[in-house]
Image (cartoon, rainbow, N blue to C red):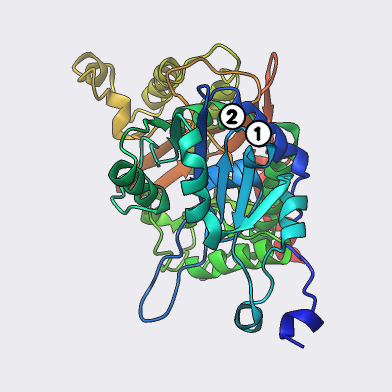
Amino acid sequence: MGFLNFVQIHKIMKYKAPASDLFVLNRKNFAKHMLPGTAAVFFSNDMLVTNADGHYLFTQNSNLYYLSGIDQEKTILFLFPDAPRPEWREVLFILKTNATIQIWEGWKYSIEEAREASGVKTIRYADTFDAFIRTVISHCTGFYLDFNEHERNSLTASGAGNRFASFLREEFPAHPLHRAAPILENLRSIKSKWELTQLQEAIDITAKAFNRVLGFLKPGVMEYEVEAEITHEFIRNRATGHAYTPIIGSGYNACVLHYIENKEMCQDGDLILMDFGAEYGNYSADLTRTVPVNGKFSKRQKDIYSAVLRVHKAAVKMLVPGTLLEEYHVEVGKLMESELLGLKLISKTDIKNQDPAWPAYKKYFMHGTSHFLGLDTHDVGNRYQPFKEGMVFTCEPGIYIPEEKIGIRIENDILVGKKAPIDLMKHIPYEVEEIESLMNQRKKK
């Protein structure tokens, strides 16, 4: 009797996955945008090699997960709404496990488990995909393929989608190829109730980590120790890890926007900027808080912090249906300009002589205020279309003064509501008095 015949490995996910209803709905919505007679193919991300026989931790392709709910390598989703045979209309291909894989890697989806997770009725093994395509291709008028078209993407590495496109162009050049990315960009930017549940869980875990840090921080601890406290709280609460590499910058390091070394000692009198977020079930939280290492803001630190907080609160109010992201950033810039004038960091002369392409306030606030959030930290979405109910954005103004070793950013995750914004992080402290009180209460324990 073979190993697989007498050992049954049950599905145990680290996180609680959404109901398959989410993925069934997502596929239906995508299919509505497909041209008649076309098919769509989505591939999981490749396993990436580190060195020798090592691999990076697998991260699922966000679009494949959005449409299937399958969080595993070597997965393919095929959609063909107008297929002449019903069993061709949705087909999910998964890795065929065996005794060796079970011994070395453990659980993989069974056909029944993949069907339950995805809501796809026809499940096949990935090693049958090539033969399947050659069977159905004469009935397809073209293919929708998924490529990374994110405006911030600068990677040149190709994946399974690129390889499949090359195969089609070489062997079936008469079949036109269509872009899946614009369809999914619009669909994914509006979050369903299931997605908001996952996102809120990621946020709540992030809140627990921040509260833990408030009781841990003191002069003399290392930035990497702070990172370790956050990581500990993430993992013990079933997060799959960090949504992105955390930024833990004290003193001058807080002025380096993408500081990730997290290697310096936190000094008495300095501020520490912490930008981190939990990933839960592939959904990303994104939080930034800036607090005094010793638990007490100096007057100068408090003045600058209060200025950032005023901009943050005013910016949140603009995250409503109908707002345009580009116009929103301009308006937030005007708010920041006023605050920097009040802090005497810029002058009216600076404003009069400024380059319109790089306003005077950009010297101290050089990044944007908001980005889409969801399955990815910098999630997909069309920045040139008006905000709609159900979109989720970060709101993260900041002021950075390297010569004073002061860098302050305050960031919350905001849901665009029907009439007013909904702060998904309203339970995470950010008022000066609240932060000081919590830090000093916990230090006494």
User: Residue 32 sits in which quadrant?
Assistant: top right
Secondary element under disc 1, as helix, strand or loop, is helix
Instruction: Between residue 34 and residue 182, name the one nearer to us.
Output: 34
Left or right, 316 with reference to 146: right
Q: Which quarter of the rendering shows the C terminus?
A: bottom right
Instruction: Between residue 343 and residue 284, name the one nearer to us.
Output: 284
Q: Residue furthest bottom?
A: 1
Q: Position of residue 4 (x, y in %)?
A: 73, 79
Secondary element under disc 2, as helix, strand or loop, is helix
Name the disc covering residue 30, or none. Answer: 2
Residue 442 seen anywhere in this rendered image of the structure: yes
Tell me if residue 33 comes above or below residue 72 in the rendering.
Answer: above
Instruction: Between residue 109 and residue 61, name the one nearer to us.
Output: 109
Q: Residues within 10 Å of mark 2 (few under 14, many from 20)?
A: some
Q: Amino acid at mark 2?
A: Phe
Name the disc covering residue 26, or none. Answer: 1
Q: Position of residue 243 (x, y in %)?
A: 55, 53
Q: Position of residue 284 (x, y in %)?
A: 59, 47
